[in-house]
Image (cartoon, rainbow, N blue to C red):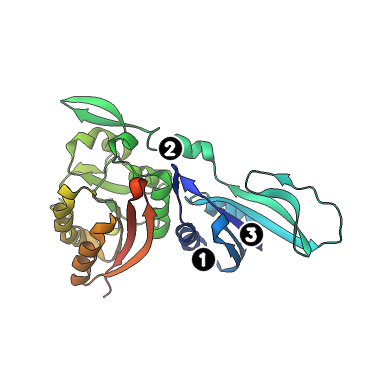
């Protein structure tokens, strides 16, 4: 079946590279069998054949972060008749003309902008402890919260199974925990900052604990998947580097890590993990405010 894909142009005023959105889409849909027919990267659009019915496509697409809409296309020969498509912002539905044929377009999936806005870090209340009192904070203003769309991207790259034991050892304001909960996945989360305990305890009820990632109170070979964003600040860099061996210790031999890091952390982290026998693959680079570039690494430990 033929589909037209519209990738998001930006989130939070920051552009989303075409290749990054395409990488996420393929991570989710390539296993079902698809063939890319045409791409317009400047307009964030792609045409493809996908061997799934529209209702199945819509169900799977609901977890995508960087895809704005998916349209089903039914082409027929064009015989010169008048066409009156209906505009829906960036796309049209109904009969449209494409070269020497007409195409009937229907919306299979359109991202729910209102739900995304409600789940944004600056709209999500998070409880912190300050001087012995609980206070409400917003992750966006505290610079510790992950974009909802970026969290979706990381989970889509990770491809977790419902049975996977998942760990986030740098919980922060719980962006990854929030996404795991939305998907119905169980995630264990920790953070060294005890001021975050009220909020993380609420998000990860029964699976949160305060701990230094360099010394996790967990048995070896416990987790199938680790998805995390270590802190970027220079003052934390050495602690992050020192935590890699411990995070590896609690990962099962066949397990995987998905790390979102600052660009200037990549060389050191990659060298350290490869020295431990890991295969490190660069999945993509997420742009952040202030020109920050954040690589996403997938780490496996071949037998």
125 sits left or right of 194 in the view: right
Return the residue at label 2.
119
Identify the mark at residue 30; answer none if there is no mark. 1
Between the C-alphas of marks 3 and 2, the distance is: 28 Å
Q: In the image, residue 286 lies at what x, y percent?
A: 38, 54
Counting from the top left corner in percent of width and height, residue 233 is at: 21, 47
The residue at the point 86 percent across, 61 percent down is 79
How crowded pointer 3 is (Cα within 10 Å; few <14, some 14-19, many 20+) is rated as: many
Image position of 135 (left or right of 30): left
Q: Measured from the top left, where is residue 245 in percent x and y?
A: 16, 61
Which image quadrant for residue 226?
Answer: bottom left
Q: Is residue 118 above or below residue 272?
A: above
Q: Residue furthest top?
A: 133
Compare residues 95 and 255 and report the one nearer the observer: 95
Rounded to the nearest whole Å, what is the CA distance between mark 3 and mark 1?
Answer: 14 Å
Residue at mark 1 to residue at mark 2: CA–CA distance = 28 Å
Q: Residue lying farthest bottom?
A: 303
Q: Which mark is residue 3?
A: 3
| Label 3 element class | strand
Sequence-wise, which precedes: disc 3 or disc 1?
3
Q: Position of residue 121 (x, y in %)?
A: 37, 37
Quadrant for residue 20, please give it: bottom left
Q: Left of 131 or right of it: where is 40?
A: right
Give the quadrant of the N terminus.
bottom right
Pick whichever, 141 or 127, lies toward us. 141
State whether residue 47 appears in this view: yes
Q: Which mark is residue 271?
A: none
The mark that comes first in sequence, 1 or 2, is: 1
């Amino acid at each position: 079946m033929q589909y037209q894909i519209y990738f998001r142009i930006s989130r939070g005023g920051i552009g989303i590279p075409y290749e990054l959105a395409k990488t996420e889409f393929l991570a989710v849909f390539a296993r079902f069998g698809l063939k890319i027919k045409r791409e317009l990267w400047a307009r964030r659009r792609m045409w493809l054949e996908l061997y799934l019915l529209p209702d199945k496509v819509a169900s799977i697409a609901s977890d995508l972060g960087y895809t704005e809409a998916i349209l089903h296309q039914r082409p027929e020969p064009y015989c010169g008749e008048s066409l009156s498509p209906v505009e829906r912002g960036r796309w049209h539905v109904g009969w449209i003309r494409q070269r020497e044929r007409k195409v009937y377009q229907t919306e299979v999936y359109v991202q729910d902008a209102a739900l995304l806005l409600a789940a944004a870090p600056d709209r999500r209340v998070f409880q912190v402890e300050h001087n012995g009192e609980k206070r409400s904070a917003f992750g966006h203003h505290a610079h510790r919260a992950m974009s909802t769309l970026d969290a979706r991207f990381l989970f889509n790259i990770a491809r977790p199974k419902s049975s996977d034991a998942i760990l986030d050892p740098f919980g922060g304001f719980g962006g990854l925990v929030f996404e795991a909960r939305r998907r119905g996945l169980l995630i264990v989360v920790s953070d060294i900052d005890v001021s975050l305990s009220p909020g993380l305890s609420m998000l990860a009820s029964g699976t949160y604990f305060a701990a230094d990632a360099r010394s996790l109170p967990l048995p070896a070979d416990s987790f199938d998947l680790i998805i995390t964003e270590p802190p970027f600040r220079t003052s934390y860099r050495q602690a992050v580097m020192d935590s890699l061996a411990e995070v590896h210790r609690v990962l099962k031999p066949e397990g995987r890590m998905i790390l979102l890091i600052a660009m200037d952390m990549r060389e050191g982290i990659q060298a350290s993990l490869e020295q431990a026998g890991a295969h490190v693959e660069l999945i993509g680079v997420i742009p952040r405010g202030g020109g920050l570039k954040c690589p996403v690494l997938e780490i496996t430990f071949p037998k």
